[in-house]
Image: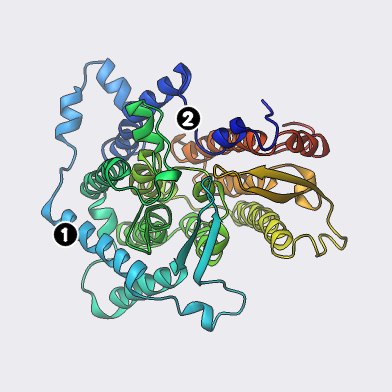
Amino acid sequence: MSIPNGSGASQGQWGRAWEVDWFSLASVLFLLTFSPLIVYYFIMSCDQYHCSLMDPIVDVLMGNSHLSDIWNKTPFLSWKAANIYICWVTFQVMLYILVPDFCHKFLPGYVGGIQEGAVTPAGTVNKYEINGLQAWIITHALWFVNAYYFHWFSPTIIFDNWIPLLWCANILGYAVSTFAMIKSYLFPSNPNDCKFTGNLFYDYMMGIEFNPRIGKWFDFKLFFNGRPGIVAWTLINFSYAAKQQELYGQVTNSMILVNVLQGIYVLDFFWNEAWYLKTIDICHDHFGWYLGWGDCVWLPYLYTLQGLYLVYHPVQLSTANAVGILLLGLVGYYIFRMTNHQKDLFRRTDGNCKIWGKKPQYIECSYTSVDGTKYYSKLMISGFWGVARHFNYTGDLMGSLAYCLTCGFEHILPYFYIIYMTILLTHRCIRDEHRCSSKYGNDWKRYTTAVPYRLIPGVF
């Protein structure tokens, strides 16, 4: 529904929902109930059933096993895992708040240090310490120094404690989500950027506070979106590769591809962390269980399924298949990065630039914040942004498919990622466009007329 710019309704609809319909509530209850079970089921299937998603169900239905048998075979929380996880999170917190960024001082083109975020619905502009690339470099340097010199712990330590670490991640995810909700009632960072629907379950999952913070610099959204989950992503894959070497005496080319392609994605995230401040996660989502638990558990455990699968099912790809998958991943990354680069260049220059050798075309629009301030913006309809409204997501999906193809076609488990990302990004397209329609009103109609497709030209 389009709402005229400057109206009170437009202000109220900018961002997360104020009111909850029955479908939204049902969806929230479903996700709160089943998301933890889905993560457990996938990891348990690999640990006990060699990554088969059907065998546990068949076993229980045929009476060959009981749910209690499966649960009793599951490794429980251990002091070793708890100590590993506490040290890991504490180290990442220290890198985040105690070590100012120095990478921007010697890496040409990298934007780090103190940066401003987007305008919040209440009209606030938060400042952030961008030092994720630095944290990634320091963490991985220490990892490799240990692996090749000090030998304080085995490079397989993450895989060897994977399920006990799952319980630690769940404890942190629920703890930070619950704390964020309590904080929003008792001592919010900015009361004007809070949204209360009156529905406890929806508010817990989707969050109440827009930018919860402790002190001046510890921002919940930026920290948990980037650290500790994404910094750990590449370390988790390295641990899988080390386990493959330990078990089989070699690391397969499929495992190398997973490490390379996902490593590029992780490094891209941290290289462009300042740009990330302008994305939907930071600009629109409130901080609740969806981000808190999701970043602690869902991301590190389900985004790394390809590497985990390859430990149990090592796949040696033919040269042609390996090259084809690599090209698919690199082309997808190129589309993803260049699409975002064009948007960033357009924003930084206020349209005074060239996209594909031409001055970009755009639609001028306006919107009003909660405090009544009117802002003006431009929506580009040139370059990749003229091909589809979310063509960066198209590139992202190509990369996601490449990760999955490294695993062959014996099991469906490693293909969960492309299925999930397709649902997630399609839903994000619709969610983002609903917000934009409410935010920009009739200007958004003009934009969608100029760029009619969301992801795939001529199809969707």
Going by the numbered disc 2, the residue's amino acid type is: Trp
- Identified at 23% across, 57% down, the residue is 85
Where residue 192 sits: x, y (%)? 44, 44
Where residue 50 sits: x, y (%)? 33, 39
Residue with the mark numbered 1: 83
Residue with the mark numbered 2: 18
Q: Is residue 26 above or below residue 256?
A: above
- For marks 2 and 1 on the same chain, the one whose residue lies earlier in the sequence: 2
**The C terminus: image quadrant:** top right
User: Which element type, helix, strand or loop, lies under badge 1?
Assistant: helix
Is 147 left, or right, of 25 in this rendering? left
Is 357 left, or right, of 311 in this rendering? right
Where residue 424 sits: x, y (%)? 53, 36
Compute the Cα span from label 2 to label 1.
41 Å
Along the line of sight, the residue nearer the viewer: 350 or 133: 350
Where residue 341 sits: x, y (%)? 68, 60
- Identified at 48% across, 63% down, the residue is 127
- Identified at 38% across, 24% down, the residue is 30
Q: Is residue 313 visible?
A: no
How many discs mark residues in the rendered view?
2
Along the line of sight, the residue nearer the viewer: 229 or 96: 96
**The N terminus: image quadrant:** top right
Going by the numbered disc 1, the residue's amino acid type is: Asn
Is 7 left, or right, of 37 in this rendering? right
